[in-house]
Image: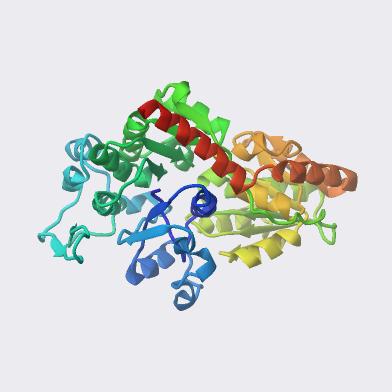
Amino acid sequence: MLGWEDQPILNGGVGKACFHLAEALAKQVELTMIVPQADHSALDHHAEIVGLDELNLAEVKQAPVEKTFERFATTHRVPAALFPYEEPAGLVEPSMDDEDAVIDATTAEAAAPVVEEPAKPAAVNFPSGKPQINVAQGARGTLNFEVIQFARYAARLASHKEFDVVYAHDWMTFLAGMEIKIQRKVPLIVHVHSLSFDRQVGEPLGWIYELETKAMNEADLILTVSERTARMITKRYGISAKKVQVVYNGADEVIPSPVTPIKRKQVTFLGRLVAQKGPLQFLKVAKQVLKQDPEVTFVVAGHGPQLEEAKQMVRRLGIEDSVTFTGFLAPAKAEELLKNSTVFLLPALSEPFGLAAIEATLAGLPVVITHQTGAAEVLPQASVADCNDTAGLAELVLNLLKDTDLRQKQVEANQKAVKQLTWGVTADQVMENLHSVLELQD
């Protein structure tokens, strides 16, 4: 299994999903994890980029024991700083010649021309029986370089392993997955948690889109987190629907909290502050709500590239007194925030699933989400409107703030549905699909 982020810092919900899914799968298979591990300088750099500078990095650089993959899987960490949510300006777009080298390469080595490597690779010697890995020295830090670096390491580690299938999560691991499939002649399963069309809101970066397209064509099976994502794959990437299977994300096996009482009227956004999740839409909805009920308060919890733009919008809309920005919140603090809120609002423009909506449901909150959010498929009583319908979203929020019975009905129905969405169930569905692929290989 190829993951693309690791403790201690998780960029987003995909890292959480991969961890819980791997933990559940390990109960059924002999699992080997290959994940990136950024060095301290990369973590420090990342902290500056995404606004984690208020964290005590000395505390978070060492992951808690209960959150490490080693607890349930053979784990290899390779030096690659895969921070996928940095600003697009942090990426280096290859020229057409170089892009062909990335996408059409049959090995990760062939992809190397995308970046300059002024010094010859330095060999790292391993004990007898271990692979020798060439570590590229020089031009580091661009995301395409790190993807290639991860593929190099992963392929060499895989060359010394016996396994039946390679299981890759999202585009940053797809190059490695393709290389391992070719090298070891095993089936490739790709699990799509998000697409370029989600992250760039309809304007995908060229080389990443091409990598996604190549990998999904090469894959023996594609798993997606929602029907919405499955439709996007067939429509935007030209992939046969027969090759795509939907496996919904799971939920933590915790006792759902009772419906949160209305101590105060507080509407919360929790997530990365990026265009696809709609933090600016959240503020537009807030303005509409405040026109009808000036007592409502709004909390924006999270970090990301739209933070400053969001703060500027708050000032422009004249709602400074009603909106609080918390910055990044550790899981315990995020849970505490949800339990002290009244309504969860995620006005996403393009959200493949939306684990935060599940977390809010478990915390006892009614949720307002958009038709563009995959979680709407598994929350039968979520309040749903189009992402561009700020007036409609505001009306849904106001209804939940006014009607206690409606809140109770929605939360109880959604919690009942979420009880069926455990990570164990997700792992069972993944295993069923893996077996179907392996049977075709016999």
Q: Horizontal placement of 297 versus 113: left or right?
A: right
Residue lying at 25% horizontally and 52% vertically, measured from the top left: 160
- Image-based side of 435 in relation to 41, left or right: right
Which residue is pictured at 73% across the width and 41% down the height?
417
Q: Is 68 situated above or below 401?
A: below
How does the figure colour the protein chain or chains?
rainbow
Q: Residue at x 47, y 55 (%)?
A: 305
Q: Position of residue 104 (x, y in %)?
A: 22, 34
| Position above or below: 307 against 284 | below
Relative image position of residue 291 (x, y in whole percent): 77, 48
Q: Position of residue 17 (x, y in %)?
A: 53, 50
Q: How many marks?
A: 0
Q: Can residue 230 be seen by looking at this rendering?
A: yes
Answer left or right for 145 relative to 380: left
Is 142 in front, or is 13? 13
Q: Residue furthest front?
A: 442
Residue 359 or residue 67, whichever sits in front? 67
Find residue 127 and report its horizontal and vertical position in percent.
Answer: 20, 66
Residue, x 34% and y 42% (percent of image)? 174
Confirm whether residue 398 shows in the render.
Answer: no
Q: Image quadrant of residue 130? A: bottom left
Q: Quadrant of the C terminus?
A: top left
